[in-house]
Image (cartoon, coloured by chain):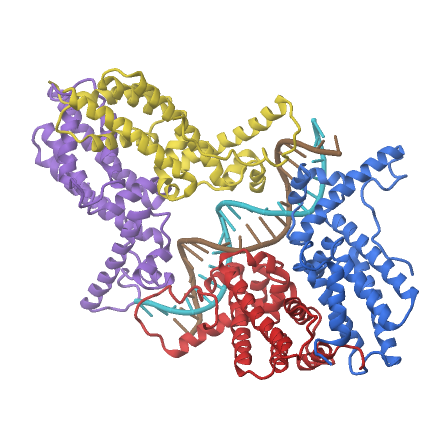
Chain colours: A purple, B yellow, C blue, D red, E brown, F cyan
Amino acid sequence: MTTTTSSGRAKGSGDAAGGRRRARGGQALASERREHLVRLAAELFARKGFQATTVRDIAKEAGILSGSLYHHFDSKESIVDEILSSFFGELMAANRAAVERGGTPREVISALVRIAFGTLEPHRAAITVMQNDWNYLKHQERFAYLTKAEDDVEEMWVSALAAGQTTGLFREDIDPKLTYRMIRDTIWVAVRWFKPGGRLDTEGLAEHYLKVLFDGIVTH
Amino acid sequence: MTTTTSSGRAKGSGDAAGGRRRARGGQALASERREHLVRLAAELFARKGFQATTVRDIAKEAGILSGSLYHHFDSKESIVDEILSSFFGELMAANRAAVERGGTPREVISALVRIAFGTLEPHRAAITVMQNDWNYLKHQERFAYLTKAEDDVEEMWVSALAAGQTTGLFREDIDPKLTYRMIRDTIWVAVRWFKPGGRLDTEGLAEHYLKVLFDGIVTH
Amino acid sequence: MTTTTSSGRAKGSGDAAGGRRRARGGQALASERREHLVRLAAELFARKGFQATTVRDIAKEAGILSGSLYHHFDSKESIVDEILSSFFGELMAANRAAVERGGTPREVISALVRIAFGTLEPHRAAITVMQNDWNYLKHQERFAYLTKAEDDVEEMWVSALAAGQTTGLFREDIDPKLTYRMIRDTIWVAVRWFKPGGRLDTEGLAEHYLKVLFDGIVTH
Amino acid sequence: MTTTTSSGRAKGSGDAAGGRRRARGGQALASERREHLVRLAAELFARKGFQATTVRDIAKEAGILSGSLYHHFDSKESIVDEILSSFFGELMAANRAAVERGGTPREVISALVRIAFGTLEPHRAAITVMQNDWNYLKHQERFAYLTKAEDDVEEMWVSALAAGQTTGLFREDIDPKLTYRMIRDTIWVAVRWFKPGGRLDTEGLAEHYLKVLFDGIVTH
DNA sequence: GATGAATGAGGCTTCATTCAT
DNA sequence: CATGAATGAAGCCTCATTCAT
C-alpha cells in the first residue's frame, strides 16, 4: 500500500555486516558524499540519458576515477535506481495526497497535472531516463517497481477521468485510458525541450496545458 | 522546394563504375536484398532504438555475419539514415501537400494531425529512433537534415495555429509554438505504446486526439 | 645460375590441367587483360605499398568488383609476385650483362649505379613494395627468391668494389659490404621522393650520385 | 623557436583533475608503467613498423589484454606519437645545437651526420616507423609536426651545404637539396640492417660514411 | 569473366566492473 | 576513500577470399 521503492541502499548500509560501527557523523558525511555523487550523476543522466552516460563521465564530473565510484555504489544501475525511486516516491506520495484530498474530478485532474509538471525541474534526470531508457530498464527485475508505479499512477488518472465522465463533467466520447496516456506523455516529453528560465516556468506550462486539455484550442 | 533527403545511397552502386549497363532485373534484385535488410534493421530499431541495436543484432536477424552487412551498407549510420530520410521525405511531402491544399486552419491542423498519426505504423522505426536517439544524431553533420526538416515542420504548424488565432477560430490565450510542441510530442511518443491491432487503429487515435485537442475533455 | 623468378604464373596457366586448350588468340587476350590489371595494381602499390593497397582498391581501379580479380590471380600476393619477379628478372639480367661486359671496376660500378637508377621509373611499384613491405614478404616461402636475388646482387657489387681496392683504384679504408648497402639504399629510397618530370631525370640523378660517390663533395 | 613536439601526453593525467597533489612517488610510478609500455611498443614498431603492429601484439608483449592498453593511452596513434615526438625533439635540439656551435661547414655537416647516426640505436622505433609508415602518418593532422620538423632539418642541412659551396669548400657541381636527401636517406635507411653489436657501432658507421661523403671512394 | 553475396578472422576501441595497494 | 591497473565482453568496421549464378 505504501510507496514501492527500490530495495537496497547499496554498499555499506548493511550495518551489522562489517561489525564496524560508525559514529553518526561519519554516516552523515558518507551520506552527503553519496548524495552529492547522485546529484552529479543525475545532472548527466538528465543531459544524455542513462545508457549514454558512462561511469567515467560521472567520475570525472566528481573529480575522481571511475573505479572509486564503486566505493559508493554497487553498480551504475544502483545510481539510477536511487534517482528513479526517489522520483517515484515523491510523485506517488503527491499524487496520492491529491487523490485523497478529493474535490471534483476536474480539481483532481488539475492537481495531477500540476504535480506532474512540478516534477519536471526537480526530477529532470529521472524523467529523462524514463524517456530514453525505459526499454532498457523495464525488463530488469530490479526495476520492476517502475512498472508497478506506472500502473498505480494510471489507476489514479483513469479513475479520476472516469469519475468525471460519470458525473457528466467530462465528455463521454473520450477513452480514459487513452486520454491518460496522452496526457502523461505530453507532460513528460516536455523534459526534452523545457529549459528553466524561459518564457514560462513549469507552473505556467501547467496552466497553459490545462486550458487546452479542458477546453481545447477552439474558441466557443 | 523538394524533399530534403539524405545524400548517399551508399555502397555498391559505385563500386564497379564502368559504363556497363545492367539489366533491370539485376538492379532490382540488389535493391530487394538491400531493402530487405533495411526492413529487418528497422524492425529492430523500432523495438530498441538505434544505439541499443547492434550490427550483430541486425546481421543475426538476417542470418548472416555482421561483417557481411558492410557489403550492403557503409555503416550502421547509413542504414538509419535511409530509414530516417525516407520517413522525413514522406512526412514533408504529405505535410506540404496538406498546407497547399489549404482550407480553414482547423482543416489544415486536422490534416497535419492525421498525417502524423498516419506515419506511426509505417514508420515506427524512424519515429522510435527519433525518440530515443535524437540526442546522438542531432550533432552529426550527416543528420543535419533532420534539424532542418523539424524546423520546416514547425513552421507549418505554427503558421496554421497562428492563422487560426487571427481568424478568431483558435483561442488567443494559447502559445502556438508551445502548443505545436506538445501536439508533436504527444503524437510521436505514442509510438512507444501503440501496438497495431489494438482497440483503435491510428486513424481512431487521430480522431480521438482531434476531439480533445479542439474541444477539450470538458463537456460544454 | 640463371634468374630465379617466382614459380607459378597463376590461374589458368597450368595448361594440361583442365584439358581445355585455348586458341592462341584467347591466350593472348587473357594475357593482355592480366597484364593490364597488373599494371593497375602496380600503380597503386607504387603509391601506397603492397599492404596498404586493398584488393578492392585494385578492382575499383579496373572497374570491376574485387571478387572478379580472382579469375585472374590466385591471390593478392600473386600479383605482387609478378611485379617483383619481373623487376628482379630485369635487374639481374642487366647487372649480369654489366659485369660480363667487364671494364675497370670504376666502369662496372658506374654501370651498376646507372642500371639501378634506371629501374626507378619503370619499376616504381616493385621498388616501393620492397621499401615498404620487405619485412612482410621476406619471411614467406613464396618470396624466398627475393632474398636469393638480393644476395646475388650484393655479390656483384662487393666483388667490383673489392676489385677496385685490389687494383688501387678505390680506397682501402672503406668496407665493401657496408659501402654496397649504403649505395643500394640511397638509390632505392629515392623512389619515395623522385617524381618524373622534375629538374633531373633518373640519368641526371645517377650522374650526380656518381660524382659524389667517387670523389666526395669536398673540392680537391 | 623551441622544439616542435606533439601536444597531448594523453590519458590519465586529466582524469581526476582536482587540485590534489600526488606524492612524487605515485607520479613517477605511473610514469614508469607508461614508459615501460611505450618501450615495449617501440620494440615492436622497430621490428615491424607501426601499421603492421597490432595493439594485441603490444598488449601480449606486456602480458595484458589489448583493451587494458587504453588505460594508459588514448589510441595506438598516441603511442607512436610519443615515440616520434621524443625522437624529433631530441634530433632537433641536437641539430640546432650543432648549427649554433658553428665552425666550418665541414664541421657542421660532420656534426649533423654524427648526430643522425647517433639516433639510430636509441630511436630505432621512430626511424623505422618513419621509413615504413610515413605515407600513412603524413596526411594526418596530428602528425603535421613531422613534416614541419623535416622541413626544419632540411633547412639546416641545405644551409650548411650551400655555405660550404660559397666558401669554396664543397664542389659547386652538386645540388645541395638533392645531396641532403641522399645523405638523409642513406643514414636512416640503415636502420633496416643495422644490428647493434656488429663489427661497427653507429660511431664507426658515421666515420665511415663521412669519409665517403667528403672524399668519395676513389683514391686520389 | 563478372557479379553479388557471404565468410571468418582480425583490426581498434569502449565500457562496466574488480581489486590490490 | 581513492588510485592505478587490469579484465572481459562487446562494439563497429575492414579485408582477403570463396562461390553460386
Query: How many numbered circles does the render carry?
Result: 0
Residue at horizontal 54%, vertical 83%? D101
Q: Quadrant of the N terminus of chain D?
A: bottom left
Q: Position of residue B160 (x, y in %)?
A: 24, 24
Q: Is residue B106 above or below residue D5?
A: above
Quadrant position of the C terminus of chain D in the picture: bottom right
Q: Relative to the observer, which residue lies in front, A22 or C183?
A: C183
Asked if residue B123 shows in the view, the reply is no
Residue drawn at (25%, 55%), measured in percent from left and top?
A: A39
In the rendered image, residue E14, in percent from the top left (x then y), is placed at 44, 53
Q: Residue at x 51, y 60 (%)?
A: D144
Q: Could you tell me residue A58's position as x and y percent?
A: 33, 56
- Image side of residue B132 versus residue A119, left or right: right
The answer to which of D100 and D24 lies nearer the viewer is D100
Picture layout, residue D32 above or below residue C4: below
Image vertical order of residue A113 relative to residue C52, above or below = above
Please identify the quarter of the rendering in which residue D7 is found.
bottom left
Query: Residue drawn 30% across and 51% down?
Result: A44
Q: How far across and down, in percent of the image, does residue B153 sit?
A: 31, 29
Compare residues A199 and C189 and report the one nearer the observer: C189
Q: Quadrant of residue D201?
A: bottom right
Is residue C11 visible in the rendered structure shown here? yes
